[in-house]
Image: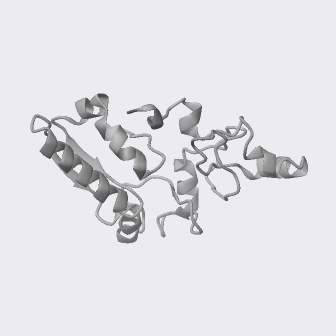
Amino acid sequence: EFIDPKVRNSHELPKWLAAKETQDKLRGKKVMMYCTGGIRCERFSALLSQLKADDPSFETEGEYMVRGGIERYMKTFPQGGYWKGKNFLFDKRQEQIPEKKPSEELEKEVESYCCKCKEPWGLYRGGFKCSEKECQVPIIVCDACREALAASGAAAEAAAAPKLLCPLCEEGFSLRELA
C-alpha cells in the first residue's frame, strides 16, 4: 500500500507520524521512503526510531529508504529505472528528470496540473504560491494561465486569489490542525 503523508515540508512529519491513523497504517509493515536528496528520509527515519523507542508496542517489518534520494537514483538510472515523470524542485533547478529518458515518455507520465485551469501541466516556473494563508507553497500555473493573468494585470493579485490553491489545500488537507 502506498501512503502519501501529504506534508508540505518536513516540519509536518512529526505531526503526521504522531497521528494514530498513521501509526496503524505503518504498524507491522515494511516502510519504504524516498525524497529529493535523502535529508527528509533521514529525518523521518530518526522520528520513526524515536517512536519505536518511546512505544515498544509499535513495530514495523523494517524501514528502507532510497539513499541519496531521487537525485542520486536518477544519476544511477539515467533511463529512469522505476521512476515515473518529473521530480519538481522549488529552487533554481526547477525539476529533476532522468537524463536519458525520452521527453515524449516523460510527458505521458506527468500527473500534475495547472492550479488555475486544472489542465495537465508538467512545468513549474515560479511566481505563484498557494493563496491559503497558512500554506503559501509554490504552485504550478500553465503558460496560458500565466499569460492571461499577466494580460489582465492580475499576476500579482493572482498569487493571493482564492482560486489558486495547492492540491493539498484543494483537498482541504491540513496537518497543522493536528496536535
Between 107 and 30, the one nearer to me in the picture: 30
Q: Residue at x 33, y 44 (%)?
A: 14
Q: Provide residue 100's location: percent of width, then percent of height.
A: 48, 69
Between 40 and 77, the one nearer to me in the picture: 40
Quadrant where the N terminus is found in the figure: top left
Report the residue that reaches farthest toward the left: 56
Q: Residue at x 46, y 37 (%)?
A: 176
Q: Provide residue 53's location: percent of width, then percent of height.
A: 13, 46
Q: Residue at x 56, y 59 (%)?
A: 90
> Would you identify the image quadrant in which residue 171 lies?
top right
79 vs 156: above or below: below
Between 178 and 62, the one nearer to me in the picture: 178
Q: Is residue 58 left or right of residue 164?
A: left
Can I make out residue 55 in this image? yes
> Would you identify the image quadrant in which residue 78 lies?
bottom left
Which colour scheme appears in the figure? one colour
Quadrant where the C terminus is found in the figure: top left
Q: Provide residue 35's location: percent of width, then percent of height.
A: 38, 56
